[in-house]
Amino acid sequence: MYRLVTVQFEDGAHLLCASQSDLAILEGDQCIVDDRKVLEFAKVTRIVTVDDGSDYPKEPMPAIVRRATLHDRSKAGESTVVGRMAVATCRRKVSDLKLEMRIVHVRYSFDRVLLTVTFAAAKRIDFRELVRLLAAELNCRIEMKQIGVRDVARIAGGMASCGRRLCCCSWLKNFEAVSVKMAKVQRISLNPVTISGMCGRLKCCLRYENDAYRQANNEMPHDRARVSCPAGEGVVVDVNVLRRRVKVCLADGRALEYDANETREIPGTRPVLPQEEDHPHAEIPDS
């Protein structure tokens, strides 16, 4: 029996590790992780016990070394300070080499043998010369990690339009595909300012209630469908999904509003609407 432990690094990245079942560690604890013979400082976010009859996973994977001591936490704090100083060095080298990239975050490993440089760029960057110069000046291994705009927002943090912390930097662990079709289903204005998040991409929260809206829409008359209502027959011109209200335009030009239960869609009269193309990048979340 052993445990699978998910840990989170300073830059928000997560890593799945293995741990002996008798190791005294709990969710929320800080720990030391051995990842490919490099020691890392991280925080435990999730623990799952695996009882498959083996003492340890068959496939090699990062391992929890120990629960962080007071000395470990002090050393990790020093590494954070040194890492902030290394940011200036990285940005200076990027400027000297005229590379079209933006340094987002720099993190030293716990033993300071590895420096992970996280950057954002619009295209692939040849950073071999940059790695050589940084390794010579900082005297450690350099690992470059390119991220997308959603991950940049996760690291930078901020407040969303709802007044709360961005989902990506507070609780959201994985980015799922979001499309303009979800905004249409929820009848949200397609104004880019309204449906775009701090990262400039479609808001992740468009997905949260999408399934509920789709189900609610299927239970109500559709736009431009002919329906029968207490005042006769008419055409649906507007639907309020949350209030379950339907606005019907009658033959005499009157537009009356009814509860969805007071209307009945006439079979065979539902219009076939042309398929609209989604935003070309809407279905592709950043990795």
Image: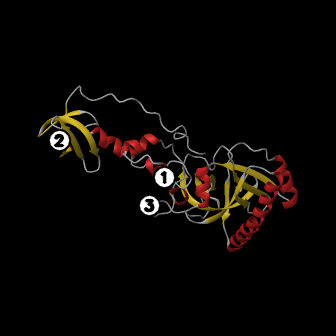
Point out the tag, 2 or 3, that comes first from the N-terminus. Answer: 3
Residue drawn at the location 25% of the way across and 33% of the way down: 225
Q: Are marks 1 and 2 in contact (CB under 8 Å)?
A: no
Q: In the image, is residue 85 above or below residue 238?
A: below
Front-most of 54 and 4? 4
The residue that disc 3 covers is 162
Q: In the image, is residue 169 above or below residue 219?
A: below
Q: Which of the 4 image quarters holds residue 139?
A: bottom right
Which disc is residue 193 wearing?
Answer: 1
Secondary structure state at the residue bearing disc 1: helix
Q: Residues within 10 Å of mark 3 (few under 14, many from 20)?
A: few
Residue drawn at the location 63% of the way across and 53% of the way down: 17
The residue that disc 2 covers is 254
Secondary structure state at the residue bearing disc 2: loop
Q: Which of the 4 image quarters holds residue 250?
A: top left
Q: Residues within 10 Å of mark 2 (few under 14, many from 20)?
A: few
Tell me the CA gap for discs 1 and 3: 13 Å
Q: Nearer the viewer's eye, disc 1 or disc 3? A: 1
Please name the amino acid that badge 1 sits on: Val
x and y percentages locating residue 176 in the rendered image: 51, 45
Tell me the CA gap for discs 1 and 2: 35 Å
Front-most of 145 and 223? 223
Please name the amino acid that badge 2 sits on: Arg
Q: In the image, is residue 53 above or below residue 160?
A: above
